[in-house]
């Protein structure tokens, strides 16, 4: 198999499990660190000529990470594609197992076994916390219904105040966000890079948890440590004090 991955989390999963299979990845595929394969541009706008030049047997894409027109163009050129779309932790674990088997893995890698164990052993008595989860600003975009990251946070005891909205990624105004009266604001460092000095100031006097976007949104080897990493970050919010 010759595989090109246009999804950073799947790049990491394939590279660690079947390193000889991966022949190309995007410029944003930063894990595993030191990965040496040809790069084909960004996830949203890959260089499809470079992808085809690598003669892949399969190109990995994701509904949210990549554009439909790129998938269609690859199919039209006779390049097989595999499009992933997990919206729950369990769904991600299942898709990963099926994909790796399809690519030739003789069994589940240790990181996937560890990930299953880590998510199966979570406590069920988390203290309830009402939260909003911005993933972008200018304009503000938040996690809504039916998202993988939303399920991750739900399993860590958070109630997403936009989970009942019609859209998967609502775009409320800042005043609407504050009006939901969250007890916690969750600010990941991707896709928007929220930081101590970029994000909490919009929510004065509200606890803001700065969390790892890789552990919140990636479905791959990071899932094995995601519960521990995210639980610690959610338990140590910062609060911007208005002067």
Image (cartoon, rainbow, N blue to C red):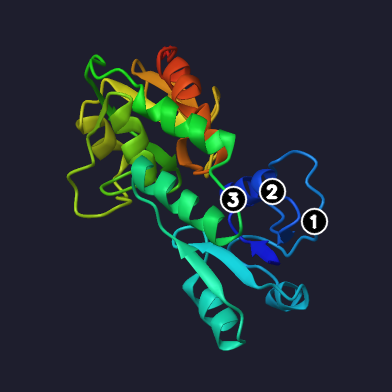
- Residue 106 is tagged as 3
Residue at the spot 44% in from the left edge and 12% down from the top edge: 236
- Element under disc 2: helix
Q: Quadrant of residue 180?
A: top left
- Residue 15 is tagged as 2
Q: Upstream in the sequence, badge 1 or badge 2?
A: 2
Residue at the spot 25% in from the left edge and 55% down from the top edge: 167
Q: Upstream in the sequence, badge 3 or badge 2?
A: 2
Question: Relative to residue 116, is residue 70 drawn left or right?
Answer: right
Place of residue 217 in the rendered image (x, y in percent of width and height, measured from the top left): 47, 41
Q: CA distance from mark 1 to mark 3?
A: 23 Å
How busy is the neighbourhood of tag 1: few (under 14 within 10 Å), some, or many (20 plus)? few
Relative vertical location of residue 13 with respect to residue 72 in this rendering, above or below: above
Residue 107: tell me if it is visible.
yes
Q: CA distance from mark 3 to mark 2?
A: 15 Å
Relative vertical location of residue 29 with respect to residue 160 in this rendering, above or below: below
């Amino acid at each position: 198999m010759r595989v090109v991955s246009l999804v950073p989390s799947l790049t990491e999963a394939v590279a660690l499990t079947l390193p000889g299979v991966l022949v190309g990845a995007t410029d944003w595929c930063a894990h595993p660190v030191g990965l040496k394969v040809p790069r084909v541009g960004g996830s949203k706008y890959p260089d499809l000529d470079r992808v085809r030049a690598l003669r892949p047997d399969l190109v990995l894409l994701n509904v949210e990470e990549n554009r439909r027109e790129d998938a269609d163009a690859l199919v039209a050129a006779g390049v097989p594609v595999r499009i992933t779309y997990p919206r729950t932790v369990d769904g991600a674990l299942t898709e990963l197992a099926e994909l790796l088997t399809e690519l030739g893995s003789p069994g589940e890698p240790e990181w996937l076994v560890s990930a299953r164990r880590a998510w199966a052993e979570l406590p069920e008595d988390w203290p309830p916390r009402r939260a909003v989860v911005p993933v972008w600003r200018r304009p503000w975009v938040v996690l809504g219904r039916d998202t993988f990251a939303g399920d991750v946070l739900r399993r860590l005891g958070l109630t997403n105040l936009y989970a009942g909205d019609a859209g998967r990624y609502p775009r409320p105004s800042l005043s609407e966000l504050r009006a939901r009266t969250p007890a916690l604001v969750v600010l990941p460092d991707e896709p928007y890079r929220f930081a101590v000095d970029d994000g909490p100031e919009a929510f004065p006097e509200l606890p803001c948890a700065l969390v790892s976007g890789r552990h919140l949104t990636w479905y791959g080897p990071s899932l094995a440590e995601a519960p521990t990493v995210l639980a610690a970050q959610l338990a140590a919010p910062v609060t911007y004090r208005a002067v």
